[in-house]
Amino acid sequence: MELWPWLTAALLVLVVQLSPTVNFYAKVALYCALCFSLSTLAVVICLLRHGGRTVENMRQGARAGGGARVAEAEPRLCWHRAGPPLTGLSPLSTISWIVRSFKYVYGLRFEIKGRQKLEVDHPCVIISNHQSILDMMGLMEALPKRCVQIAKRELLFLGPVGLIMYLGGVFFINRQRSSTAMTVMAEVGERMVQENLKVWIYPEGTRNDNGDLLPFKKGAFYLAIQAQVPIVPVVYSSFSSFYDARMKRFTSGTVQVEVLDAIPTRGLTVADVPKLMDTCHQAMRTTFFQMSKTPRENGTAGPGAVPAQ
């Protein structure tokens, strides 16, 4: 029996385990491979289940929260602690279920406080901090029903990943052409009221792992005021204890997630955007430091800021 393939595989496993840099890139490569391969599978399932683009592809029904066993909305519905839904039960939508399964591969746990504040039966704009490529898992953990996201147009062309985002109802904006982006945001504002949608936005505009929040862009706040819907801030604790691209660290860990109280916008005008931005930023930044237990920094922009993915 030829031993070289087995010895080679064993050597690769040993190198991955002993070298933090190799371990980091191996896990990132696996993450990307999972995204592309499972997106292909999800596209087929979504087309068979719903026939095309709909927010129901993203998330529907009830779910288990934070790894715990939960019974919600639909009768006779329960979820197993660490696996897929039990037989004969109404499933989660395809995209959410697949992405949430990634955490079992990487040993991640999300502990969410205040989830009920997202499960409201009216439109709202949800904003959260944006740290890394792992944010997609965190988003799906907290994603409420009938919620769509805003994403940059370039992601639409990432093969099956872009296609599954499109099928999930994601709105794509061209950040290089402000007039086009404004048109899309105006459409989003109208549709979220007409179709009772929630819209999830990363107001920092870029991924940022510098241990602080970046200044916010205005788009989410114009949208909320235009539609006269509340803003619900969601804060994720720092990933730095288990994921750090600069230090090439990628281990298992726990992410604290807190949903803050909704901030009303009824009666506000575009003149109130700066004050609204500041209120949300201060509340989220204070919560971020409390959960992450990291010292405050004088500056909000740092070397960890990179283009959004």
Image: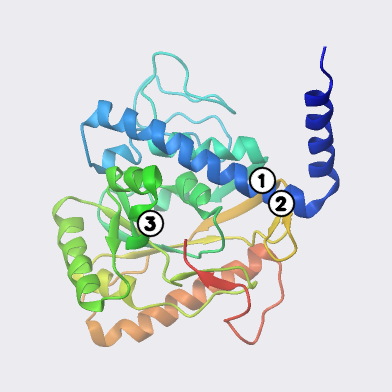
- Residue under numbered circle 2: 24
Q: Position of residue 294 (x, y in %)?
A: 71, 70
Cα gap from disc 1 to disc 2, whole angstroms? 5 Å
Residue 152 visible? The answer is no
Q: Position of residue 127 (x, y in %)?
A: 41, 64
Query: What amino acid type should be assigned to the residue bearing mark 1?
Result: Lys
For numbered disc 3, what is the local secondary structure?
helix
Quadrant in the picture for residue 49: top left
Q: In the image, is 187 to the left or to the right of 303? A: left
- Residue under numbered circle 3: 155
Query: What amino acid type should be assigned to the residue bearing mark 3?
Result: Leu
Identify which residue, 204 or 15, lies in the foreground.
15
Q: Residues within 10 Å of mark 3 (few under 14, many from 20)?
A: some
What color scheme is it? rainbow
Q: Are marks 1 and 2 in contact (CB under 8 Å)?
A: yes
- Residue under numbered circle 1: 27
Residue 2 visible? The answer is yes
